[in-house]
Amino acid sequence: MLRKLPAFIILVSVAILNKQCNRNPYVTTKDYDIVILNGRVIDPESNLDAVRNIAIKEGSVHTITEKPIKGKTTINAGGLVVAPGFIDMHQHGQDKENCTYKVLDGVTTALELEMGTADVDKWYMEREGQALINYGVSVGHVPLRMEIMHDPGGFAPVGDAVKKEASDAEILVLGEGIEKGLTRGALGVGFGLMYTPAATKWEILEMFRIAGKYKVPCYVHMRYGGLKEPNNCITALEEVISASAITGAPLHVVHITSLGFSYTPRLLQMIKEANLHGIDVSAECYPYSATQTTIESAVYDEGWQESFGITYSDLQWAETGERLNAESFARYRKSGGMVIAHSIPDEVVESTVADPKVIIASDGILTEGKGHPRGTGTFARVLGKYVREEKLMSLNEGLSKITLMPAKRLEKIAPAFKKKGRICVGADADITIFDPENILDQATYEEPAKYSRGISYVIVNGNVIVRNGQLLEDIYPGKPLRGTIK
């Protein structure tokens, strides 16, 4: 028997057995669903930036290792960056067309948080089982106001929801709608104050009070934009910071450059000062120097030229690409549609994109290929133009703005986000793999439906939906992301 042999023979025998067991060079004999090999893995939370192999099993990151691994599906990511899937907090287009643009820009989660919905249950039900990427929505003050006041508008109101001051009874019904939406899983409360100028400050404060009761975020398109006193962007930000301070509701200011223009640095200063005094305020921007909204909305009511510091020729009709004049402006105001306004100074775009506290979000929507290039190229533009070409920030910093920062902003209202925006063991397998030397937006104002380049693979909940830059057909792994309140 072995125990009767001399000690040196036992040691040799054990060594031989160990050598035989280790002939398999793999770290484990488990059959992983997907393995990603030899990629430059960047995790903004841990600051990991190194070549690693990743194993995915049952929709989650199972292993991150330097050792060889194998699985049912293998992705060779040599020379590519393996990053958390990009999170877009401000995406209006929620149909298959728009989600295709999103996923080919590296996005694995796209949320409608600014305008939101009046019926949270219906909104989620309409997308169940047919979503390319993860989805979620706020309960929206604007759509609720439109519903209560029987406004005939579409994306934005055009009737009483614009012009009519709400009665005390209507404010009560609005509040009940907000509270119901939160109980049904909304990710917070959305506000488009510029679209509802007749909504009094008291009405808005009452809605903030409900958000404050549950400590859920308010995502706000501010009441005013531009530089003209007294109703300018400074006044608008004062209103919502005040509402946040009074009620305790966290505040997120959407597309801050599209309302602040050259005053955006002042707005960011105000937000940082509010943070220093314990008020929970954040902001986002998109990396383009033009805005887009519906021409028939209140945004383009009398006085827009003075407020925004632009004129007709700065407007571009999204459907045709033509620049407007007084005649075409009046004509399109009657018919309605999307208009692009070239109004944000380039230097403001650059400084805001690079600001370490500002999240990147697209405000995207295209209809039959027409719209603003931000709906197609926002995230590739940040990583290609502002990180690689202009070197305004490091790759890790750029990735943080489109992964970790939005996830952290949302994880208090929706704990599911604690497993998103990161690459670590146990995180959801939402992963974007891209070529750092090639990634760039290709969409333009004249051709907004051009897909970004350099996105090699996209994985959503452990399912590969983009392979070698091509969208795979008939795969719908997107899951609903809902809020929870106490």
Image (tube, rainbow, N blue to C red):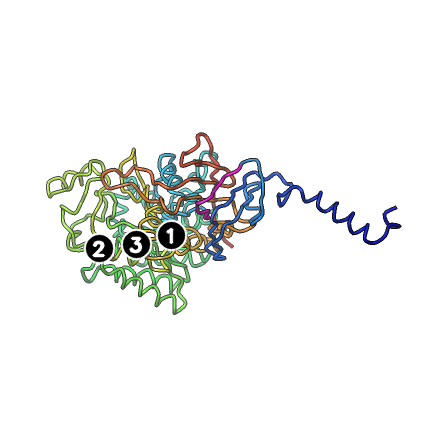
Q: Which mark is residue 172?
A: 1
Q: Could you say where residue 270 lies in the image, as x and y percent from the top left? A: 31, 65
Q: Nearer the viewer, mark 3 or mark 2?
A: 3
Q: Main secondary structure of the magenta part?
A: strand
Left or right: 386 as drawn, with respect to 86? left
Q: CA distance from mark 3 to mark 2?
A: 16 Å
Does residue 377 appear anywhere in the picture?
A: yes
> Looking at the picture, which amino acid does disc 3 mark?
Glu
Residue type at the position of mark 1: Leu
The residue drawn where x is 27% and y is 36% is: 370
- Kindly identify which residue carries mark 3: 390
Please state which of the two labelled residues, at mark 2 or mark 1, is closer to the viewer: 2
- Residue 81 among those drawn in magenta: yes
- Residue bearing mark 2: 345
Point out residue 457 in the picture as x, y percentages from the top left corner. Answer: 44, 39
The nearer-to-camera label among 3 and 1 is 3
* Mark 2 burial class by Cα count in 10 Å: few <14, some 14-19, many 20+: some
